[in-house]
Image (cartoon, rainbow, N blue to C red):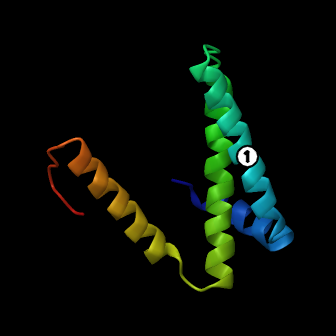
Amino acid sequence: MFNERERKIMELSVDKCGDKLITQCIQEMAELTQALTKYQLGDLNLANIIEEIGDVKITTEELIILFNTKYNNINSGVDRSICRKLERVVVRYDLEVVNEKY
């Protein structure tokens, strides 16, 4: 998802900002929520949605780095959560999955 340079920048951001990144992520998610709500109401500003998705992806990754640093490895828990969610999607929409790995 992120290259080595980008990941290093995020790690430095986590080292410098720490828990302040939680507030930043909340703000970015709120901005994405607002952009998506406007989209549903007919404002087709895709550039804004793309920008906000990018901001949320970055701040979410920074939170993963932050919480991995504080609480060892949360990646396995995140991975399990993702697998459960994808399984629910497969069942809900009766999807045929090739090379099933979940």
Question: Residue 35, position in %: x, y?
Answer: 67, 29
Asked if residue 37 is positioned above or below residue 83 in the image, the reply reads above
Q: Label 1, secondary structure: give it.
A: helix
Question: Residue 25, position in %: x, y?
Answer: 73, 54
Question: Residue 15, position in %: x, y?
Answer: 80, 73
Q: Residue furthest bottom?
A: 72
Q: Which residue is mark 1?
A: 28
Asked if residue 10 is positioned above or below residue 43 in the image, the reply reads below
Task: Please state if 102 lies on the left or on the right of 21 as rendered.
Answer: left
Quarter of the rendering containing residue 64: bottom right
Name the image quarter holding the C terminus: bottom left
Task: Please state if 22 lies on the left or on the right of 94 as rendered.
Answer: right
Front residue of 42/15: it is 42
Q: Residue at x 69, y 73 (%)?
A: 66
Please give the count of numbered marks on the rendered protein. 1
Quarter of the rendering containing residue 48: top right
Instruction: Give the crowd class for mark 1: few <14, some 14-19, many >=20 residues within 10 Å.
Output: many
Question: Residue 24, position in %: x, y?
Answer: 79, 54
Task: Please state if 28 lies on the left or on the right of 39 as rendered.
Answer: right
Asked if residue 28 is positioned above or below residue 80 in the image, the reply reads above
Q: Residue at x 59, y 86 (%)?
A: 72
Front residue of 69/96: it is 96
Q: Amino acid at mark 1?
A: Glu
Q: Residue at x 67, y 65 (%)?
A: 63
Q: Residue at x 63, y 85 (%)?
A: 71
Quarter of the rendering containing residue 13: bottom right
